[in-house]
Amino acid sequence: MGIVTVPDGAADRGHAEGRPSSVRIAWTIVRVATSVTALVALFYGLPLDHSSVRAALTILLIGLAGFIALVGFQVRWIIRSPYPMLRAVEALATSVPFFLLLFAATYVVLAGLSPGSFGEPLTHTDGLYFTVTVFSTVGFGDITAHTQPARVLVTVQMIADLLVLGLAVKVIVGAVKRGQAGTSR
């Protein structure tokens, strides 16, 4: 997401060898950690369990559009980067948590609006846990969708998960290849 940048004058000795320097890697880790921390803090700070149906749909639709835009910007950054692989790792390390937190937020809103939607009430942590079990296809069965709207939402997440795992990763890998081809000229 690029919240923190490498300071001017920071040595990038690895550039000549085609590898990023330890300073650049460290700043990438700081950017990822800062971005993910900000996303998690926002997720836990929002009063999601007191929202409306309109808020839930707005969160999901705007969030998915934001996710698509974020991946689009990241693809451009990967292609233009002198270290496309490092930028791709950063892109995945920020995009996937954003995607997961988006669905977790929607589940918490839905559970607050209709308490019978899931097998138990969902806190922010429960919503995140459920989202990750669906994303990873583990599905322990301790939290399940009980109503039609909840099942539709979980189905949408499963389809979106496949798209993220397949299409988004393919696009990012393709951007890495284009970026590497551009830096080897």
Image: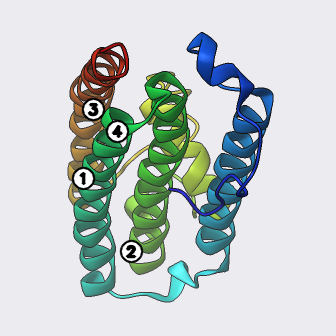
Q: What element carries label 2?
A: loop
Q: Mark 4 points at which residue?
A: 80
Classify 4 as above or below 50: above
Residue 5, given in percent of the width and then of the height, sits at: 64, 57
Left or right of residue 104, residue 35 in this image: right
In depth, the one of 119 and 92 nearer the eye is 92
Residue 68 is labelled as 1
Residue lying at 58% horizontally and 64% vertically, measured from the top left: 121
Q: Which amino acid does label 2 sit on?
A: Ser
Q: Which amino acid does label 1 sit on?
A: Ile
Residue 103, given in percent of the width and then of the height, sits at: 40, 55
3 vs 2, front mark:
3
Instruction: State the separation of the CA atoms marked 1 and 3.
Output: 9 Å
Q: Mark 3 points at which residue?
A: 168
Residue lying at 20% horizontally and 50% vertically, measured from the top left: 152
Instruction: State the separation of the CA atoms marked 2 and 1.
Output: 29 Å
Q: State which tag comes first along the sequence, 4 or 3.
A: 4
Dot 4 crowding, Cα within 10 Å, few <14, some 14–19, many 20+: some
Q: Mark 2 points at which residue?
A: 114
Q: State which tag comes first along the sequence, 3 or 2.
A: 2
Q: Which amino acid does label 4 sit on?
A: Arg
Q: Is mark 1 on a helix, strand or loop?
A: helix
Left or right of residue 139, residue 72 in this image: left
Left or right of residue 22, residue 77 in this image: left
